[in-house]
Image (spheres, grey):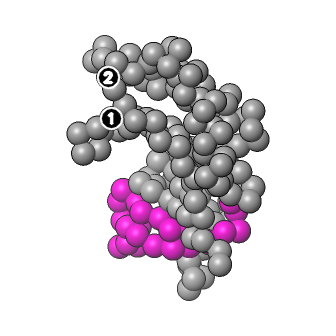
């Protein structure tokens, strides 16, 4: 159990470093994660900004954040630093994302079925405060309106506007 707490504190330190570096460039830190993929640890930062994140933005952020992360030496093993754009189909991870992207169509996957479905696309109407916490107000293409607590959403992503 102690290892999990230490890792949580480590990831919190990395998140703070990433947020400060992102703010310097006018970026939003969407996600930071430490994951093991194909036997290699990856420290991943996902960024966004109005108009999108380009390769040059990723390079600038990487050059800024790498020495800051190394200075606190938070990861006890070797890892690859990866910086990428949230993309047009960026994930919705925090309550403020559901406020910010009201009016957009999102793809959702739920932990439990609602009306017999776990996956669907819907227009995001906004964020509601319900008794059990924040919830996404949604409307499906056929006009069905529902409110889903954020804790019941396994994954939500913007549908790209072309």
Name the side, left or right, on which 150 lies relative to 51. left
Image quadrant assignment for residue 125: bottom right
Q: Secondary structure at mark 2?
A: loop
Q: Quadrant of the C terminus?
A: bottom right
The span shown in magenta is 101-123
Measured from the top left, where is residue 143 in percent x and y? Answer: 60, 82
From the top left corner, tell me how far across and down residue 45 is, in percent: 52, 40
* Neighbourhood count class around disc 1 (C-alpha, 10 Å): few under 14, some 14–19, many 20 upward: some
Q: Which residue is mark 1?
A: 41
What residue do we see at 30% from left, 17% from top?
3
Asked if the magenta segment contains residue 116, the reply would be yes
Residue at image point 68% right, 57% down: 52
Q: Quadrant of residue 58?
A: top right
Question: Is 25 on the left-hand or right-hand side of 32?
Answer: right
| Residue at the bottom extreme, as displayed | 142
- Between 118 and 146, which is closer to the camera in this rendering? 118
Instruction: Please tell me which residue lies in front, 140 or 43.
Output: 43
């Amino acid at each position: 159990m102690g290892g999990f707490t230490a890792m949580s504190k480590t990831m919190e330190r990395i998140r703070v470093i990433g947020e400060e570096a992102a703010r310097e460039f006018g970026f939003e830190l969407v996600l930071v994660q430490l994951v093991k993929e194909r036997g290699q640890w990856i420290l991943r930062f996902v960024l966004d900004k109005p108009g999108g994140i380009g390769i040059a933005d990723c390079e600038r952020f990487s050059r800024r954040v790498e020495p800051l992360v190394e200075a606190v030496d938070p990861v006890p093993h070797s890892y690859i630093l990866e910086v990428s754009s949230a993309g047009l189909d960026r994930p919705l991870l925090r309550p403020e994302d559901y406020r910010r992207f009201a009016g957009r169509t999102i793809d959702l996957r739920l932990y439990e079925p609602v009306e017999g479905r776990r996956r669907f696309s819907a227009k995001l109407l906004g964020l509601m405060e319900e008794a059990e916490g924040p919830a996404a107000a949604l409307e499906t293409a056929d006009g069905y309106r529902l409110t889903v607590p954020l804790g019941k959403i396994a994954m939500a992503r913007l549908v790209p506007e072309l």
